[in-house]
């Protein structure tokens, strides 16, 4: 997780869920949460990941930026819990000296198996506390890749994701408007989706599986904006 700073203006909240699926994914009851930025497994096919980006701006530090970009490759599981959170707060600044707070969290999950029970939570919160003309923006992006058989993202795909991570870090040094930051984050999310879809398509189908009958990768995106 990295931290940067930069100027700002309006309150926006963004949540985006992108799911790339080859196997069946179903929601189930919540699993125990892990510490932020961690992955854990109980050794019996259950995995947990928890990631977050937290930014707080105030009169002492009027600009704040935090981002998280994590990749969790589970392998074969029958149940998984994933929590991703972006939380930005601007507090107690004035119209003459407004605050800007931006938090962006990208969480990538890969897993394999049939009828996987997945509890995925993707949350963003942007809060202004007595902060006139402050800009507060939180974006949570969660990507879940499910395949029938386990696979590992190729070195090329991992290099591409690392480059996207560097570009996400660079947004912390940007003085662009919140609308521009949002647009750039959305563009990076689209690139991640493309990389994951291509990677999932290379996953082994298993013996005796008709390639024409195998389920093709699908991408589902949920996006919420609050101004």
Image (cartoon, helix red, strand yellow):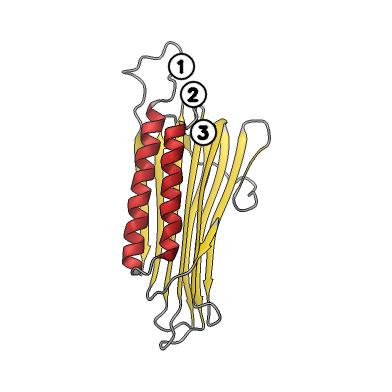
Which residue is at the front of the view, 107 or 163? Answer: 163
Which residue is rendered at x = 49% and y = 36% of the image? 110
Which residue is rendered at x = 53% and y = 62% of the image? 3
Q: Residue 25, position in %: x, y?
A: 46, 35
Spatial CA distance of label 2 from label 1 is 7 Å
- Please indicate whether residue 120 sits to the left or right of residue 191 in the image: right
Which residue is rendered at x = 66% and y = 30% of the image? 44
SS category of the residue bearing label 1? loop
Residue identifier under label 1: 206
Residue identifier under label 3: 111
Q: In the image as oriented, which residue stretches furthest toward the top?
A: 208
Q: Earlier in the sequence, mark 1 or mark 3?
A: 3
Q: Earlier in the sequence, mark 2 or mark 1?
A: 2
Residue 23 in which image quadrant? top left
Disc 1 and disc 3 in contact, CB within 8 angstroms: no
Residue identifier under label 2: 149
Q: Residue 218, position in %: x, y?
A: 35, 35
SS category of the residue bearing label 2? loop
Residue 195 in which image quadrant? top left
Which residue is at the front of the view, 113 or 91? Answer: 91
Disc 2 and disc 1 in contact, CB within 8 angstroms: yes
Disc 3 and disc 2 in contact, CB within 8 angstroms: no
Q: Badge 2: few (under 14), some or many (20 or more) residues near its Cα, within 10 Å? A: some
Residue 204 in which image quadrant? top left
Q: Earlier in the sequence, mark 3 or mark 2?
A: 3
Quadrant containing the C terminus is bottom left
**Residue 204, placed above or below residue 8:** above
């Amino acid at each position: 997780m990295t931290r940067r700073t930069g100027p700002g203006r309006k309150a926006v909240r963004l949540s985006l869920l992108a799911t790339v699926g080859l196997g069946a994914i179903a929601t189930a009851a919540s699993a125990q949460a892990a510490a932020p930025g961690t992955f854990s497994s109980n050794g019996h096919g259950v995995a947990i990941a928890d990631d977050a980006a937290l930014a707080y701006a105030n009169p002492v530090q009027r600009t704040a930026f935090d981002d998280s970009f994590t990749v969790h490759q589970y392998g074969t599981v029958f149940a998984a819990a994933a929590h991703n959170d972006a939380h930005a707060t601007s507090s107690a600044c004035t119209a003459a000296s407004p605050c800007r707070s931006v938090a962006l969290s990208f969480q990538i999950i890969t897993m394999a198996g049939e009828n996987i029970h997945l509890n995925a939570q993707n949350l963003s919160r942007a809060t202004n506390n007595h902060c006139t003309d402050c800009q507060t923006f939180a974006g949570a992006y969660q990507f879940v890749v499910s395949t029938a058989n386990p696979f590992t993202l190729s070195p090329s795909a991992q290099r591409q994701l690392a480059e996207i991570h560097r570009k996400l870090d660079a947004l912390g040094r940007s003085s662009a408007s919140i609308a521009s930051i949002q647009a750039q984050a959305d563009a990076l999310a689209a690139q991640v989706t493309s990389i994951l879809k291509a990677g999932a398509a290379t996953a082994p189908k298993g013996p005796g599986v008709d390639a024409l009958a195998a389920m093709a990768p699908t991408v589902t995106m949920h996006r919420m904006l609050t101004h």
